[in-house]
Amino acid sequence: MIAVQLSPEQIFKEVTNFNCKLAEGIKTLREVGDLPSGVTPKEEVYREDKLVLYHYKSPTGKKPTNKIPLLISYALVNRPYMTDLQENRSMVRGLLETGQDVYLIDWGYPDRSDRFLTMDDYINGYIDRCVDVLRKRHNVDAVNLLGICQGGTFSLCYTALHPKKIKNLITMVTPVDFQTDDNMLAHWIRSIDVDLLVDSLGNISGSMMNWTFLNLKPYRLIGQKYIDMVEILDNPQQVHNFMYMEKWIFDSPDQAGEAYRQFVNDFYKYNKLITGEVTLGGEKVDLGDIKVPVLNIYAQDDHLVPPSASKPLKKYVGTKDYTELSFKGGHIGIYVSSSAQREVPPSIGKWLNARS
């Protein structure tokens, strides 16, 4: 290692610049104000318990050209407005621009009354009823389904159990094989006594889940990003971008205890999705029953769902129309980076329009 010698003048200049950025940053942070949870106009079309089903409207007034509605099923562990974070970082807007008629399930915030909700309640209950709302609303037999992360796993289960209600299926950063060697999260979770955890706590707190995700990359996600933040404090737009992300990261709902128990045990501990042993509503989930077209999108640098966990889907589904899309980025970048905005929604729209 080569030691760098700084003169007193250089040190004084560095300290002065740092203090100036902090002073300017305080002013910038005061002007940030309230940050919205999503930016694209939407209307509520269905509500049940904590769940709200939203229908999005194009800000430009563009009408949907695809007659088959697209339903987005997000994960339970974070809030779905990551798909519509800012005007220039919105997957929802990108999909609207391709002519899709976009709906999204907002799972809300579970409380103690939801302690005994199961995966069957979420998949054969909530998702199924949302699908039926769209089928009736649009007078179609089947809808397009886009599942993201854990919501993608739920969407795989749903499509396998209700194949006649889905026209096309898109999975994005979706775990399929939960026991690949490079899946750090899976290694951690398999060491947890989830039954003791749920029996003791009931619901699993969002802050506990968030702490776990941040500690997968503690230096980058807990320390370095705040050091780097100083460098952008004099740039209002970059500060806004940073604060939008911070709001989403720490807006973590609690997890319904029984659904969490089954998801960890069946998927992470015993990898039952790929062995065909997941049981929902008394029926086995067989990925081979998925015969509809499938588009599987994964991120090459994903630390939560590595490509090795997502790509095995190809050999388990029963469809002959299977497509993969590889994105050069991470688990979060696939929603919000500029390259993602250029690549991912247009690719989804093109794929759907060719099949709908």
Image (spheres, grey):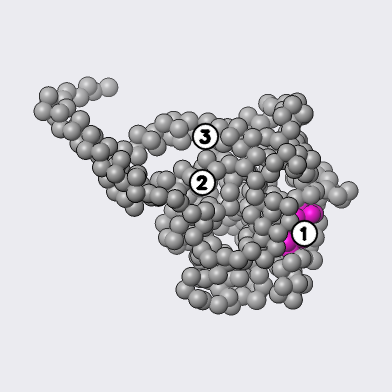
Does 35 appear above or below 272? below
Q: Which mark is residue 248?
A: 2
Secondary structure of the residue carrying numbered label 2: helix
First in sequence: mark 3 vs mark 2: 3
Classify 10 Å Cα crowding around label 2: few (below 14), some (14-19), many (20 and above): some
In front of the other: 6 or 88: 88
Decide which of tag 2 and tag 1 comes sooner along the chain.
1
Callout 3 amino acid: Leu
Q: Residue at x 41, y 57 (%)?
A: 338
Residue at disc 1, secondary structure: helix
Q: Is residue 312 left or right of residue 276?
A: left
Q: Which residues are magenta?
A: 123-131
**Residue drawn 20% across the image and 24% down it:** 4
Instruction: Report how far apart the C-alphas of labels 3 and 2 lie in the structure.
Output: 13 Å
User: Residue at label 1?
Assistant: 128
| Neighbourhood count class around disc 1 (C-alpha, 10 Å): few under 14, some 14–19, many 20 upward | some
Three-letter amino acid code of the residue under disc 2: Trp
Above or below residue 338? Residue 356 is below
Q: Secondary structure at mark 3?
A: helix
**Residue 183 horizontal/vertical position (percent):** 60, 36
- Residue marked by disc 3: 214
Q: Which mark is residue 75?
A: none
In the picture, residue 199 is in which quadrant? Answer: top right
Percent from the top left, x then y, of residue 279? Answer: 83, 45
Q: How many marks?
A: 3
Give the overall secondary structure of the magenta segment: helix
* Residue 152 at least partly seen: no
Q: Amino acid at mark 1?
A: Asp
Residue extending furthest right?
282
Q: Which quarter of the figure has residue 294?
A: bottom right
